[in-house]
Image: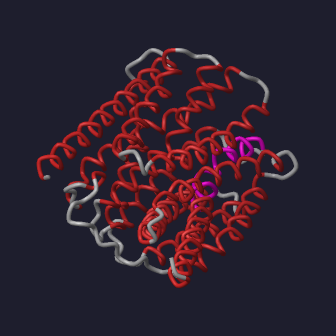
Amino acid sequence: MDSTTLSIDRGASRTAVAVCAASLAALAVAMGIGRFAFTPLFPLMVRDGLLDSHAGAMLAAANYLGYLAGALAASRLRIRPALLLALGLAGTVLITAAVGWTASAFWWNLLRFLAGVMSAWTLVATSAWGLGWLAALGRADLSGVLFSGVGIGIAAAGLFCLLLGSAWPSPRLWTGLAALGALASVFPLVLSRSLPAPPAVALPSAAAPNAAGAAPQRSAGLVACYTLFGFGYILPATYLPALARQLVDDPRVFGLAWPVFGTAAAVSTVLVSWRLARANRLRVWAGAHVLMAAGVLLPAVWTSLVSVTLAALLVGGTFMVITMVGMQEARARAEGQATRVLGRMTAGFALGQLAGPLASAGIAKLTATESGALRMALMLSALGLLASAAYLWRLRSHERSINQENR
């Protein structure tokens, strides 16, 4: 290898590391802070007399609707991913700060709606921009580092609230998180400006098994699976803390639960990405759905601190793996329409996420107790995850047989 080639390789490696760091920071801000910080902050806002359970549910619903609206808009916007990333990050920081500057329920609902929009924009834009650059640089194996940003952001927001929650009122915590988000946004904003668009990567005529024979219009099945993922994930993510609260009185357990959840999400993406070079994405996706289904079913058939803990690990350890693998697979099939296809995937997740609580509420009207309704809703969620896992496994087998016939 001559000195010129060595210099090029080192430059590509530095660029890949920079892209990973910028994408990680962007997802930590937009998802870990902008989207999920409400989870550890909600009980603190209740403590301060700012919210009750009903108002908290309304704020959560507003955020889900915003996430859906943002995903639908991202799939139609004709702007560069780097610009969409910048808009999402700037909006997230301002909106997070604004929540701490007002005490109006109307403005809180509007701001949480807009926070959902910004989160969806940033996830779609970061996936298109970051994965695009990693593919162009031949470092798709680093995708796990990129998506670990969500878990890192969740853990950081949880630790921030755990350490300062007893000393600071909740409005100050919101503005403090906004300040952290502003600092973390500097590098991704600077790098996305200097590296606005990745170079196109020409696919070989004999496509790899992960994207064999796939065209943008063939992404409908993947969108449906991703929708069922949103439906299956949201109920345990919403109700597991409540179940834990019924079983344990120590508030430190609740304070640590969210950082542990985020850490599991961050570590899982890195570990799985190391194996993706030797594994098929569809098979990994299907396996993650099966594990998540087990986590969803556990508290439905066995209510104890052990089952709730195992469920949290299974759900927390797979939800970002599914996000990472699903986004990679969809982008591989996008044929130059990455933002549009990834926007559809994110919209599907948001739709499933909205449908979960609605299904639980509908079942509650047909059952005698709330616990029975939750149990039935969890079983329905697990069924959807298992059905989508079967589809993904069958899709991989079908594409593999087509590849063998074409050889």
The picture quadrant where one finds residue 81 is bottom left
Q: Is residue 193 visible?
A: no
Image check: 155 left or right of 120?
A: right
Give the farthest residue toward the right: 167
Q: Is residue 406 above or below residue 204?
A: above
Where in the figure is residue 17, as x and y percent of width and height? 59, 68
**Magenta stretch prevailing secondary structure:** helix
Residue 26 location in percent, x, y?
58, 65
Residue 81 against residue 58 in the figure, above or below: below
Q: Which residue occupies the foreground of this view, 239 or 105?
A: 239
Residue 197: name its quadrant: bottom left
Q: Report the residue that reaches farthest toward the front.
A: 1
115 or 395, nearer to the observer: 395
Judged from this view, the residue extending furthest toward the left is 405
Q: Which residues are magenta?
A: 30-47
> Can you tell which quarter of the image residue 212 is in?
bottom left
Q: Position of residue 270 (x, y in %)?
A: 56, 50
Q: Position of residue 243 (x, y in %)?
A: 61, 25
**Does 39 appear in magenta?**
yes
**In the image: residue 358, left or right of residue 335:** right
Confirm whether the magenta stretch covers residue 100.
Answer: no
Q: How is the image coloured?
A: secondary structure
Count the numbered circles shown.
0
Q: At 52% across and 35% down in the image, what residue appears?
A: 315
Is there any visible trace of residue 135 in the rendered image?
yes
